[in-house]
Image: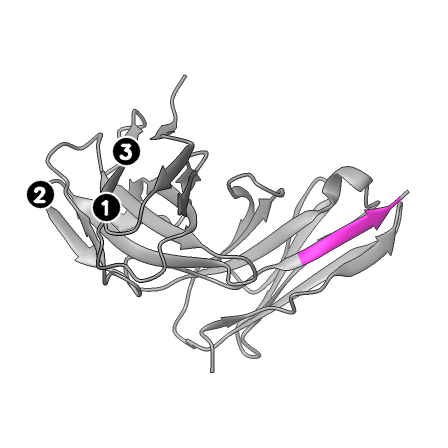
Amino acid sequence: DGGITQSPKYLFRKEGQNVTLSCEQNLNHDAMYWYRQDPGQGLRLIYYSQIVNDFQKGDIAEGYSVSREKKESFPLTVTSAQKNPTAFYLCASSGHSSGRNTGELFFGEGSRLTVL
Amino acid sequence: QKEVEQNSGPLSVPEGAIASLNCTYSDRGSQSFFWYRQYSGKSPELIMFIYSNGDKEDGRFTAQLNKASQYVSLLIRDSQPSDSATYLCAVLGFQKLVFGTGTRLLVSP
């Protein structure tokens, strides 16, 4: 089945450690996104990529890094520089129509990161 | 002013009633609007999108768009307890979606 796979679902980290969240899609979508969700704050965009080997900062990119070496994969690294990393992280992808982003996002199941 | 605003709720309706969820947006040039449903602890799923002024119906769901007033709404007819979730309004900006904070809907049996 086509879809987006995020791993791990749950992750615990000690302060000062970097962690990498995996996101893989087999939908053949060009665009991929990382969102962070905190209680009562909706979804906030961390990074997005419209095409392989290119990505842009979203609204809250500080303390995070990404790579897009393959169309299928868009991993997110939460670095020790992120002040408050405990959150629910969502990866999403979307296709294009006539070269334009359709805006219809397909989400993975999410990764819940807790910093101890 | 937030780009996309929603009342956080909760909005409580009895089973069988019509639930009305509202959203306003600030970018007058926005062209595409979306409603996502998110159950507690789960990821969002797209339930409706609308591009043109007026109403768009899909089963029990109706999306309404008024670009002049910069207003989008979602009506859920014959509400069911399984509709209890957070509903996220999203507006397509340049290359990315901007989400509201969501409205929590509670449908009581």
Q: Nearer the viewer, residue A114 or B63?
A: A114
Q: Measuring 28% from the left and 29% from the top, which residue is drawn there?
A: A24
The residue pinned by badge 1 equals A17
Residue B4 placement, left or right of B12: left
Percent across and percent down for residue A18 are: 22, 45
Tell me which amino acid carries mark 1.
Answer: Gln
Checking the image for residue A22, the label placed there is: 3
Specify start and end residues of the magenta stretch as a single range.
B104-108
Q: Secondary structure at mark 3?
A: strand
Percent across and percent down for residue B55 are: 64, 58
Q: Measuring 57% from the left and 79% from the top, which residue is drawn there?
A: B69
Asked if residue B96 can be seen in this view, the reply is no
The residue pinned by badge 2 equals A53
| Residue situated furthest bottom in the rendering | B1
Residue B29 placement, left or right of B95: right
**What separation in Å lies between label 1 and label 3 (alpha carbons)?**
16 Å
